[in-house]
Amino acid sequence: MASQLVFFTIAVIASLAMLLRWFGESRGHAKRLAMVPHRIHVNGIRGKSTVARLIAGMLREADLVTVGKSTGSFAAVIKPDGEDHPLHRTGSPTILEQINVVRDWVTPFVDAIVMECMAINPRYQKVSEERIIKSTIGVITNVREDHQDVMGETLPEIAMSLMSSCPKNGILVTAEQNPELLDIMFSEARKRGTSLIVADPTQVRPEEVAAFDFISFEENIAIVLAIAELLNIPRHIAMAGMVRAPADPGVLRIERYKIGGKNLTWANLFAVNDRESMVAATEKLRPYIGENTTSVGILNNRTDRQRRAIQFADIAVNDLAFDRLVTFGAYEDLVSNIVINNGFPKEHLINLGEQRNPAIETIIEEAVAKMPTDDVLLVGFVNIHTHQAEMMLEYFEDEANRGKPRGKNHLVAVA
């Protein structure tokens, strides 16, 4: 009996200690947040990392001491001088990482924080906003079909999920243009006492888009310009800050090489995994397609993304216009059957995925050197990770390091 009492007493003391520690850390976090006048929380399906970096660049140019946090393909704190401080994780990423960033980087001298939302589940998005960031300005870049297993099957359902990060009694900015989705966003914003501002991409001038050394999207620029107007930052300062902002290391690249006797244009769009963004991205590739160009699309399919593999087997034929298609990774038979049933010529389909598991030399031979024209546009999309995709990315990185790229390289920031 005495031992039970001792055990119970220890358990109570331990629980109280944990409660006091949580209460102390919670108060400390709230105090640090309260010191920051401008707190910007960037959510959406496409373009979050790019928009977060552009906003941070704009604020720095306006002489606001700014701490940014980009998640995307490269988790990093963007320091007030604009340099990246990589975040090294010891386990799976969690939204608690945002608390650590505020603890470690926010000081009384910080004017603004710009945090990319790292939550997918709507419940965690809500916690990120209401408990961790408490934004003064929220951003939802756009609504696209992605993460439907947790965010909903339809675009209206996904819009509702994204609105979980809408601030209370604040301002929300979006570049989404779909009237049905905007109705949902206006309704949900009103419930939270928040004003929704719809950024207009058509107001972005051609010379402003051309000022970047990467192929940017008007929607992303429009969001940042809308925030600049809210904060009374002149347009020319906002644009200068965006142009100076270092691109995300995972930003999509268009690079030119001389490989396999071909003039190769390589477009790394592996991070693009929804229809609208892929259509928009391929529109940006039109200048790279001439009469003597064979366009080759790589369907890069992951074992844990069967649904996406099926979707893009349809998209590749029905919404895009590649001369050749290559399958990488998993689901080769499934994807091949769908592609062929959609009317794509069987003889123009090349299987280089897990069933063949080819060496990188074979991939380059089949997907580049054997093409019938001197110019080849090679585009990877659907997923970032598979063994074949990683080999290809490493191959092109080695080629670049050997100084073999020819012509001007460009970056593509996905909308």
Image: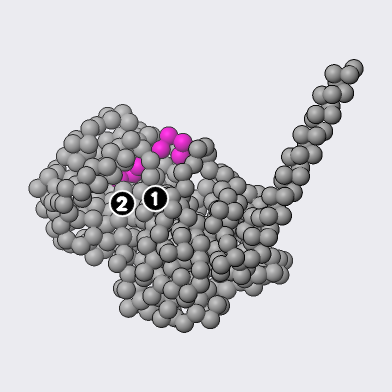
Look at label 2 and name its amino acid. Answer: Asn
Look at label 1 and name its amino acid. Answer: Ala
Which quadrant of the figure contains the C terminus?
A: bottom left
* Rendering coords of residue 242 (x, y %): 40, 70
> How are the residues colored?
one colour
10 Å crowding of disc 2: few (<14), some (14-19), many (20+): many
Q: Which segment did they paint magenta?
A: 298-305
Q: Nearer the viewer, residue 269 or 410?
A: 410
Element at label 1 = loop
Asked if marks 2 and 1 touch (Cβ < 8 Å), the reply is yes
| Residue 239 figure quarter | bottom left
Element at label 2 = strand
Numbered label attached to residue 39: none
* Rendering coords of residue 255 (x, y %): 23, 55
Q: Residue at x 43, y 68 (%)?
A: 57
Q: Which residue is mark 1?
A: 271
* Rendering coords of residue 296 (x, y %): 24, 49
